Image (tube, rainbow, N blue to C red):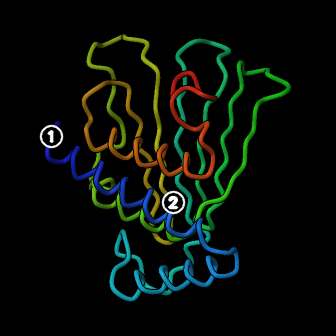
Amino acid sequence: MTLASRAGLALLAGIALLSCATTSLPKHARAAEESEKVREMSDSYMPFELRPDADLSKAEIFYTFISPKAGAGRQEVTIGGDGKVTLFHSRSSDDKQPTIREGRLDPAVVLRLLDFIDGRSFLRLEDHYPPEEEGCQAARRVVRVRAPGVLKEVTVQREGVDAFEQVVAGVLFSASLALPEAINGRLFPNL
């Protein structure tokens, strides 16, 4: 395991601890504590060089798997800056009853996730990593990050883009804090 992978896992463990620490408090105390954590972090540092007064409720982290097979369904994870988590899974392009799950994260966790993604130098990644073999019909995995003044989408069709893989792990892990079925093939066969 590389040093970067260990650092990524350590940050994800911190995200988990943050979530566990806030879920043991009464709901009204959690809300006050969450707001204070966001304020504390924003006073000292904001990911992607965002201004401390940036409206992070409009931020969004989106991850999807797109099969190369014609008519295949969609598998998507969306995490909003306000903490809303949405999982979307359709079995085919004409699936009339896709599975949609919604949950909620502490907004401080979303801010930490944005910080984690920024720490992987996401904005410096190439926009597209095509398959290594020309003509290969590989699945596409896409991560899009949107925040005030920031919009970046990265599409990967091959293995070995370590920073991208770490971002995906962070997104899925964070989503699983709100909806455990986001990981380990519980809802998505390919994510």
Q: Is residue 11 above or below residue 1?
A: below
Question: Which numbered tag is attached to residue 2?
Answer: 1
- Give the alpha-carbon distance from disc 1 to disc 2, as whole Å: 28 Å
Q: Residue at x 44, y 56 (%)?
A: 16
Query: In the picture, residue 17 is in which quadrant?
Result: bottom left
Q: Which residue is mark 2?
A: 146
Front position in the image: 152 or 163: 163
Q: Is residue 19 above or below residue 183?
A: below
Query: Which tag, 1 or 2, sits closer to the chain's start?
Result: 1
Please state the horizontal and vertical placement of residue 26, each as a whole percent of the image: 67, 75
The N terminus is located in which quarter? top left
Horizontal and vertical percent position of residue 11 = 32, 57
Q: Secondary structure at mark 1?
A: loop
Kind of residue at badge 1: Thr
Residue extending farthest to the left is 3
Image position of 83 (left or right of 142)? right
